[in-house]
Amino acid sequence: MNLKRVIPFAHELMRSTLRDGDIAIDGTCGNGYDTVLLRELVGKSGHVYGFDVQKQAIDNTKARLEELGLDRNVTLFHKSHHEIEETIPTEHLEELKAAIFNLGYLPGSDKKIVTHQNQTISSLSSILEYLQPGGMVVLVVYHGHPGGAEEKEAVLEYTSELSQKNFQVLQYGFINQKNNPPFIIAIEKL
């Protein structure tokens, strides 16, 4: 198959953006897969900041990083991603090269704990302000849960109104799949 599924494509976008020494954010740590990828890409001289509102997600991510020997140069926060500006040191915010989010809920956990549109938009706004030219934000939008459709619409509206002079915004997803298939919104800062 030549067309990539959404997660492999999201990871490909991160690989094309991040280099050794870069600063990156995982806005929704989940089970740690994206955090591990980001840490591998930024190397020993970069730094990754991970956020999640569920302690289980932070614990899962920490365990995965430790198991792979990648726990150095990663800072995890049991907080919402909308608290990025208050949490990450300014000198690292000003060097921010990439961020990734999986919007929705943590698979295998309480489906009532989900990302929320106002917090997601607030986080995006902060990240885009600091993102370096050539930097990338990737949102994998899962929207088949209660509140997911509203968050999807809010994120689409917000990102479609970004100035084309400053950003390129891509929507990528399969349109013939049933049951609210996830899709990607990728934002590149010019």
Image: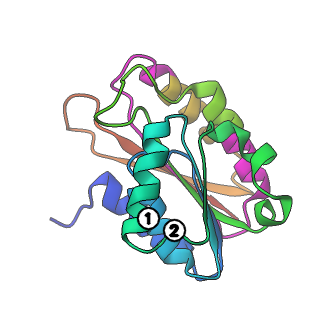
Looking at numbered disc 2 in the image, what kind of residue is underneath it?
Answer: Asp
Looking at numbered disc 1 in the image, what kind of residue is underneath it?
Answer: Leu
Residue at horizontal 47 percent and vertical 72 percent from the top: 70
Q: Are marks 1 and 2 in contact (CB under 8 Å)?
A: yes
Disc 2: CA contacts within 10 A as few (<14), some (14-19) or many (>=20): some
Q: Is residue 153 above or below residue 77?
A: above
Can residue 96 be seen here? The reply is yes
Residue at horizontal 47 percent and vertical 27 percent from the top: 114
Residue numbers of the magenta segment: 123-150
The residue indicated by pointer 1 is: 65
Disc 1: CA contacts within 10 A as few (<14), some (14-19) or many (>=20): many
Name the image quarter holding residue 43.
bottom right
Residue at horizontal 35 percent and vertical 22 percent from the top: 145
Query: Magenta stretch: residue 140 in it?
Result: yes
Residue at horizontal 50 percent and vertical 67 percent from the top: 38
Q: Under tag 2, what secondary structure?
A: loop
Q: Quadrant of the N terminus?
A: bottom left
Q: Is residue 146 above or below residue 144?
A: above
Q: Is residue 103 above or below residue 69?
A: above
Q: Under tag 1, what secondary structure?
A: helix
Q: Quadrant of the C terminus?
A: bottom right
Residue 71 numbered tag:
2
The x and y percentages for residue 103 are: 46, 37
Q: Which residue is outermost to the top?
A: 146
Does residue 85 appear left or right of residue 138 in this picture? right
- What is the spatial separation of the Cα atoms under label 1 and label 2, in whole angstroms? 5 Å
Residue closest to the eye, 2 or 82: 82
Residue closest to the eye, 28 or 172: 28
Can residue 13 be seen here? The reply is no
The x and y percentages for residue 50 are: 57, 53
